[in-house]
Image: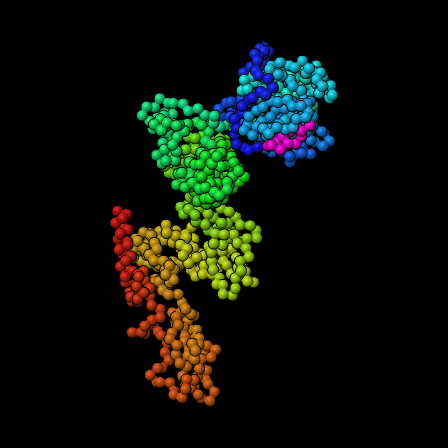
């Protein structure tokens, strides 16, 4: 049976109601009943029975009756095991059954599937239509299951008819054929009050003088005393069991016997959806049935103002919203589609078997199809347009329309609501609403399976569409770049709704570029590259991933990054230089400065500067601070200046064609020079040619081009080690007498002055 709520209406098909007998004076009173759910009460050890009373008409109660599905046929299940598997609050055993084949003897229908049609003359039936209407019938053996039957169970023996115990309760043909009626047995019963307001589920625990059971006439008295006006006897004996979820217990004599058929009830809060619009004294208001201080008035009015709804009344001058009416799924579809500005769509053939213009109207049919084509609702055999939408279904529909990639919220590490765990089908959609400040829940819960009324739906939709402000966000921001995905070691770290979410890659995967990878093809042209701390190389024509122990830079694993800032802790200064982490103890009289550099206890002299790792630091009079990050421009810090990295080892030589060049003392290549007469460059040195031939032809080298090394100390020479300072210019600006670039000296002095002024 579908899991949406259906209001139960009790219709007696046997006899019209007559004047009822007065109930016994010993009938269970209000003091005897203990409330266990909204609209559900329990009485224990009352006149030899345990009983549950379910109020079918109470606003706030949803009742979904169902019976065991065929997957249990031949194996059976206890009421407790089956109730737990189905997520039900109440469950009882029902039909008599064949204990060899574990199949019901009498008529049994489950979700429209007829299990058994025979022996009906011996049994009475309780049945529910697909719309949740309760019916009580007696069928002859020649009759088959009727079209209205959706869930039907049977019991042998009518206990109460119009409040009276039948005269043949112990002598009917069924009793004579089976002999169970006059025997002492534990029993299970199903009863209904005179006004149809209550359903009673009862198990007898037996009278002390009767050896642990009761005859059927005594059980009829017990059923009447708890409040039944109509009642039938279901199966009993060692099968008799009444399961209550909140007690996590099964009452009765069933200690583990698997029975062929159970009936259960799903109970939860919901609004009254058999709704009557009621005028409220609210003169001059846009909506006549909502008071001026109604908590949902602003949301309802916003839907009128944005042409999402025309209300529930027929008089346009007297607008009604019916706030407490249940929100039908077809109306929810209309509201969402209109708020998104979608146009109605007419399919060539109905996409849902229960959605046609004739059955739901032109608007509902057209907008449901529009939501389907946009992927906001999913394709299925039926849409259940007249069912009341649950809070989880509403979340799925609204978040799919207003939040991009809401499925990604399944990655959220912690559930916002205690009653919506990650295993719940609606988890990502409810989380999407919660983490975007659209829903807040109550006392840390969302009640996902409860039905939703019109004003509750309006308040969620209005905030999603931002017709009204999103307030009361329960979520603390931890990251700013929503949608950013990257690797942290072998974990994928995502920023979802300003929350950092971590997902670990599998043992055969590795994280790269924010994705868990395996088996990516590559070839010899692949250049080793870093992705965060992960090094990617090509091995055997597949990309290999290595998580570097410390860091990854320029296609190799390194101890540290050139951009790392220095750190100083416990008197140890740690600086990254050449991708190696160099740790040095502060000298005597030095302490760790606030900028991660060892500092004299008396501070430093304003205008002084020094290289710290690959950055140039200067003094503001009290501490060192970074003046220029040389590494950002591909430079290194050396001798108080940002300079090009060394190209070679001083004294090193190499061939450039037939010429040779040498590495000067500063670590840079000089110009390539000819080796001279009858020589050429081989094996990184000049060697003589055989036969005294000039390598380039017949002419000897010109004496105007003698070999020479570039020397940065040669007056007027252009140095290969030109100094770079913190300026957009790459030109050499010369050196101060102490090796300090003049402009940098002036800049640091100004910085120091500004800092002193700011401190003042």
The answer to whether one can see residue 641 in this image is yes
347 is higher (above) or lower (below) than 521: above
The answer to whether one can see residue 53 in this image is no
| Residue nearest the observer in this picture, 634 or 640 | 634
Query: What is the quadrant of residue 313 in the picture?
Result: top left
**Residue drawn at x 41%, y 29% as measured from the top left:** 312
Query: What is the quadrant of residue 209 in the picture?
Result: top right
104 is higher (above) or lower (below) than 573: above
**Residue 282, horizontal then vertical, whole percent:** 34, 23
Span colored in magenta: 107-118
**Residue 139, horizontal then vertical, whole percent:** 65, 23
Query: What is the quadrant of residue 27 in the picture?
Result: top right
**Residue drawn at x 40%, y 88% as measured from the top left:** 698
Q: Is residue 127 magenta?
A: no
* Residue 547 horizontal side relative to residue 126, left or right: left
- The mark total stands at 0
Quadrant position of the N terminus in the picture? top right
| Residue nearest the observer in this picture, 586 or 7 | 7
**Residue 433, horizontal then vertical, whole percent:** 44, 38
498 is higher (above) or lower (below) than 177: below
| Residue nearest the observer in this picture, 542 or 455 | 455
* Residue 91 horizontal side relative to residue 697, left or right: right
**Residue drawn at x 45%, y 39% as measured from the top left:** 366
**Residue 655, horizontal then vertical, whole percent:** 44, 76
Q: Is residue 112 magenta?
A: yes
**Residue drawn at x 51%, y 24% as measured from the top left:** 38
């Amino acid at each position: 049976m579908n899991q949406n709520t259906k209001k139960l209406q009790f219709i007696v098909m046997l006899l019209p109601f007559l004047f009822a007998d007065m109930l016994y004076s010993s009938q269970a009173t209000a003091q005897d009943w203990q409330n266990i759910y909204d609209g559900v009460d329990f009485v224990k050890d009352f006149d030899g029975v345990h009983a549950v009373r379910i109020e079918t008409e109470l606003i706030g109660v949803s009742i979904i009756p169902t019976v065991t599905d065929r997957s249990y046929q031949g194996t059976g299940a206890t009421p407790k095991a089956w109730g737990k598997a189905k997520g039900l609050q109440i469950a009882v055993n029902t039909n008599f059954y064949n204990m060899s084949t574990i199949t019901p003897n009498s008529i049994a229908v489950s979700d429209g599937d007829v299990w058994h049609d025979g022996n009906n003359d011996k049994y009475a039936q309780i049945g529910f239509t697909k719309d949740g209407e309760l019916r009580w019938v007696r069928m002859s053996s020649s009759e088959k299951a009727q079209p209205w039957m959706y869930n039907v169970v049977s019991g042998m023996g009518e206990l109460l008819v119009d409040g009276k115990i039948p005269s043949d309760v112990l002598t009917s043909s069924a009793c004579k054929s089976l002999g169970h009626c006059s025997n002492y047995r534990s029993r299970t019963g199903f009863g209904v009050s005179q006004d149809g307001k209550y359903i009673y589920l009862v198990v007898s625990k037996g009278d002390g003088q009767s050896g642990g059971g009761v005859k059927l006439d005594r059980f009829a008295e017990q059923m009447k005393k708890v409040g039944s006006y109509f009642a039938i006897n279901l199966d009993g004996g060692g099968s008799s069991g009444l399961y209550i979820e909140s007690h996590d217990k099964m009452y009765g004599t069933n200690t583990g016997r698997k029975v062929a058929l159970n009936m259960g009830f799903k109970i939860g809060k919901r609004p009254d959806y058999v709704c009557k619009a009621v005028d409220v004294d609210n003169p001059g208001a846009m909506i006549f049935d909502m008071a001026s201080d109604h908590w949902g008035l602003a949301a309802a009015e916003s839907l009128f103002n944005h042409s999402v709804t025309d209300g529930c009344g027929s008089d346009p001058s007297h607008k009604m919203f019916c706030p407490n009416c249940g929100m039908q799924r077809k109306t929810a579809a209309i509201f969402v589609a209109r708020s998104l500005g979608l146009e109605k769509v007419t399919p060539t053939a109905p996409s849902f078997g229960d959605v046609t213009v004739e059955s739901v109207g032109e608007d509902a049919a057209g907008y449901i199809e529009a939501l389907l084509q946009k992927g906001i609702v999913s394709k299925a055999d039926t849409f259940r347009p007249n069912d009341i939408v649950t809070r989880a279904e509403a979340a799925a529909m609204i978040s799919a329309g207003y939040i991009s990639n809401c499925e990604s919220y399944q990655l959220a590490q912690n559930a916002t609501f205690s009653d919506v765990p990650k295993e719940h089908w609606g988890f990502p959609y409810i989380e999407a609403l919660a983490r975007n400040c659209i829903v807040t829940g109550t006392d840390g819960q969302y009640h996902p399976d409860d039905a939703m009324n019109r004003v509750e739906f309006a308040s969620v939709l209005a905030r999603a569409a931002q017709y009204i402000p999103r307030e009361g966000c329960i979520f603390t921001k931890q990251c700013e770049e929503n949608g950013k995905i990257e690797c942290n070691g072998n974990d994928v770290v995502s920023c979802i709704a300003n929350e950092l979410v971590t997902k670990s890659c599998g043992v055969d995967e590795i994280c790269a570029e924010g994705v868990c990878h395996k088996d990516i093809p590559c070839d010899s042209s692949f250049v080793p590259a870093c992705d965060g701390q992960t090094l990617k190389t090509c091995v055997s024509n597949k990309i290999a991933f290595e998580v570097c122990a410390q860091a990854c830079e320029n296609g190799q694993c390194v101890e540290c990054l050139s951009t790392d800032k220095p750190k100083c802790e416990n008197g140890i200064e740690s600086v990254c230089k050449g991708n190696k982490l160099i740790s040095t103890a502060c000298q005597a009289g030095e302490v760790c400065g606030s900028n991660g550099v060892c500092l004299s206890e008396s501070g430093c002299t304003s205008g002084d500067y020094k290289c710290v790792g690959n950055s140039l630091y200067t003094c503001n009079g009290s501490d060192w601070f970074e003046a220029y990050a040389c590494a950002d421009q591909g430079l290194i810090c050396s001798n108080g200046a940002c300079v090009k990295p060394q190209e070679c080892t001083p004294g090193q030589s190499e061939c450039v064609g037939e010429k040779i060049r040498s590495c000067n003392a500063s670590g840079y290549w000089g110009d390539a020079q000819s080796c001279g007469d009858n020589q050429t460059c081989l094996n990184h040195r000049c060697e003589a040619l055989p036969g005294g031939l000039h390598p380039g032809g017949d002419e000897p080298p010109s004496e105007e081009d003698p070999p020479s090394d570039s020397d940065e100390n040669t007056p007027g020479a252009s140095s290969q080690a030109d100094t770079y300072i913190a300026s957009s210019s790459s030109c050499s600006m010369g050196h101060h007498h102490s090796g300090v670039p003049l402009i940098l000296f002036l800049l640091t002095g100004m910085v120091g002055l500004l800092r002193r002024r700011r401190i003042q």
